Image (cartoon, rainbow, N blue to C red):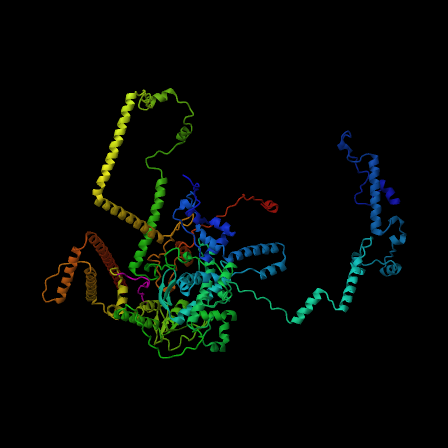
Amino acid sequence: MAAPAASSSFLGLSPGSRDPATVRRRSRGPRNRKKGWKRWAGPEARLGREIGDFLEDVVLQQRATGGLIAEQPDEGLFFVDTGNAEKDRQLNKGKEKPLHVDLVLQPDSKVPAPKNILAHQIPNGRKEKRRQQFWEKQAEKGVLPRAERRLRARLQRGRAPPEKVPEKGRSDPVRGFYDIWATDNPLDRALAGQDAWFLQQTKKQRVKRPARLQTKPSQVPAVEVIAAGGSYNPTFEDHQALLLQAHEVEVRKKREEDKVERQLRIPAGAELPTAETVFQEQCEGLVEESGDEEEDGKPPAPPAEPEDAPKTAPRQEKKTEQQRRREKEARALAAQQCREKAARCRRQEVFRLRSLRRQVTLWEAELLRRRQARLAKRRAKDALPRRLGRLRYEDPSLEVQLSDELAESLRTLKPEGSVLRDRFKSLQKRNLIEPRERAKFKRRYRLKYVEKRAFREVT
Amino acid sequence: MGGLEKKKYERGSATNYITRNRARKKLQLSLPDFRRLCILKGIYPHEPKHKKKVNKGSTAARTFYLLKDIKFLLHEPIVNKFREYKVFVRKLRKAYGKSEWSTVDRLKDNKPSYKLDHIVKERYPTFVDALRDLDDALSMCFLFSTFPRTGKCHVQTIQLCRRLAVEFLNYVIASRSLRKVFLSIKGIYYQAEVLGQPITWITPYTFAHDHPTDVDYRVMATFTEFYTTLLGFVNFRLYHSLNLLYPPKIDGQADVELKPAEGKEYAMDSESYLEKLSALSASLARVVAPTHEDEVEMDEFPVEGETAEQMDVRKKEQEALEKHKKLFEGLRFFLNREVPREPLAFIIRCFGGQVSWDKSLCIGATYDVSDPSITHQIVDRPRVEQQVVGRYYLQPQWVFDSVNAKLCLPVADYFPGVLLPPHLSPFVTEQEGDYIPPEKLKLLAMQRGENPGDARHQDEESEEEDEEEEDDNDKEEEEEEDESEKEEEMKLKKMEEQKTQSNKVTAGKLRLEDRQRLEQEQQSEEKRLAIMMMKKREKYLYKKIMFGKKRKVREANKLAAKRKAHDTAVKEEKKKSKKARRA
């Protein structure tokens, strides 16, 4: 126990030990608080630390060398060095140092590795053995396990069943086609010769397409050929006609733009608001107007006119009996006269038959006219693209080449517009799809930008 | 007032329609799937007549479908496939996320797929129905086949579209059914007559694409998906109607196989078949070898109620058509490398011509430039050096114009470096009284078999050549030209008169001998009397019609005058420039 005992006066072996002279006693705070108790202090604490260091040192030595260094014999610790390599080797023959690489590869732990139990032991060994014995016994009787039976059965059947060939997809370039309109096409072949009622009830037969779906939603032809002016080498007149058409479109567009601009422009004579007027406008009604201003302005409004006042209903006086009677008689008389007149008129109607008939025919003609007008309006509307959604159909811009853009020969022709857009617009025009606009990307949360630390240091 | 209270929006149009979102929920599909289903099944949105009623009092613009249509969609087996696909995608994503590659492989092997065959049958119960709707399918397939393979859509779709388009072109060649071609600034319009149905389609030029951003590619891809299926079945049927093999086989496969090395330079073995087919130079193999019999005169079955005149007209039409079909028969063309190969090869072969091109340009070249039997070489450059004697060097427009004019046009206007005559649209048919440009008039005259305009034109040209040689007689020539202009003017006036004669009634001069005149006078007199006898309302209508006709003629005259002014201006300018050059 020499080394640990000297720890108080000598420099310790462990890297954490310091010269005791230089170790200053740390002044601690007051002990009346719990905080002050946390660390051991005082001589007992030092003793405790020394014991701890000592024990740690012992463990380290045991781990590294297999025992305390102090108990090792001298031969274990030292070797003879004569300064001559030949002689040294002879002298230290028994305790030659192994190579460093071998040392590194040695397991350095003194604790033995756990044994691999499975190396000489099978899990569930007994059970498996029993099962094997059981099946051997069964095999003698001719009974085989299920998997074995199936395997043998398959072998007996011959070759394995053919693998299902994956169906060629609809857009596979090598898919095959057949005559779909023939009487014995493969589509109908499966259902041919079966009872119609049975097929219908078991939903094997497809639902018939309603006849209304065979009509097209628009009469516009599928491929609208461009006007003659759209030729790559047009005649003068045709080209001018097409240019005029394009020009009209542009003029219309320009007019609309101008309209908006005109509406938004500040009129020429108007005064622009200054800071003062803006302030005044904001303070309107907040500041009490002084009396002078009011007098300067307009004279005070005249008092409410009698016209504005609500008219008071004439006072109802109670009617006398006589008045009531007379009114009643007058009413009865008027009613009778009215009845008589109606009867007379009805009698006279007989003589108005011709004019009545004329009236009826007129009315019918009017109805017919209205009906026809309605029909014509609907017909005119049929040619136009319908309103199928939020957006209206908009005609694509006219493809046109200006006179100086026209190609001289086919080689120098620059195509105008895009066939793809033309097709797409045609689909919209024929009411096959509704006009849509591209869905806008909307971010729900704002992005948070973080600069990486490495990057921040650079900049 | 007994009975139950009538609630609003529980009957009538409000119950006949369904909004898109409700329909989508009813079908349990996502919006893209729903749109796809509607396109495939041909169910389109409706605009109700009384929107406010349908919309339960709201006036917001919505997309409506007929409720019955949506109920019909509920029976579609593809809906289930869509749902399966959704689940498949979910599983696949999960497997990817967990890096379970074996699962990914297994899932991909069992990817749910569907076919649209039954929908084609359902939407087009007869073959003619399908033919009537072929315009869209063809345009779409031709468009998609020109797409670059950059991921805007599936490469498989592009390949399939290309294959189907080429097959259709080959059919048109084999059946010689092309009628009209129009080179526009947008693309090339074709019209073919297949089994009596006119089919029009547009193909883009094969130049670089700019992909417009305002087009929904998903929708277009869905339409294409359906149309490829349709076009495949139609192609099959069309090929069989001509006794051709389907999938098409190139005739004389043997001699192609003799020199397989030739194909290897262009394409891999897997691709060379389609490439050879798309070269359009070889004819297709038939199921039954064609027998060259003498052409049997068709039996005629007079339709009841048809007069002999009508029969004659029909017969004449038929003959003209036969002649049109054999327009380029016996001609051998050679395409220079600067002209668009595919359209030209297609058109020339459609009318019976033989065509070839440079061997390095494309697979399937049948003969060389140096072949002495070439009759026409299509060139699109200002000058041709080393011209070979015995063939015409022509600009490509000659081919297109000849097809539209139904006759081989005189070649002089189409020599390389010559200012081309305008390319007229064959899709425009002038009504009586419309303005007809002089180029078209010339063409019509040529079709009738006359040849006046052309001769005069050549005269003019020779005049100009003379002019170059002789400097002195400028004045005379001007006079001559003036004369020719005067002639033209006279002609125009005459035409105007002809046009107006039918509607204008003028007092005739007395000429006793002229029997024709007398007859005419009598006719006009009768007409006047008839007009006088008209009822007020009818007279009003008659006047209106006459006014419209006159206005049309007036407009046509105005256009003619404008054209003349333009022509003279051009001529002046030419002359000036010529003088300047000479000075």
Q: Looking at the picture, how far across and down is residue A191, in whole percent?
A: 50, 64
Rendered position, A354 above or below A115: above
Q: Is residue A83 magenta?
A: no
Quarter of the rendering occupied by the N terminus of chain A = top right
At 73% from the left and 66% from the top, the residue drawn is: A144
Q: Main secondary structure of the magenta part?
A: loop
Q: Looking at the picture, how far across and down is residue B314, in whole percent?
A: 29, 70
Rendered position, A397 above or below B257: above
In this view of the protein, which residue sits in the foreground, B459 or B115?
B115
In this view of the protein, which residue sits in the foreground, B332 or B285?
B285
Question: Could you tell me if residue A348 is visible in this image?
Answer: yes
In this view of the protein, which residue sits in the foreground, A21 or B230?
B230
Question: Could you tell me if residue B144 is visible in this image?
Answer: no
Quarter of the rendering occupied by the C terminus of chain A = top right
Q: Looking at the picture, how far across and down is residue B136, in whole percent?
A: 41, 60
Occupied quadrant, residue B317: bottom left
Count of numbered circles in the view: 0
In this view of the protein, which residue sits in the foreground, B61 or B359?
B61
The residue segment tinted magenta is B417-431
- Left or right: B300 with respect to A15? left
Q: Looking at the picture, how far across and down is residue B286, in whole percent?
A: 44, 75
Occupied quadrant, residue B425: bottom left
Q: Is residue B420 magenta?
A: yes
- Left or right: A368 with respect to B128? left
Rendered position, B303 above or below A33: below
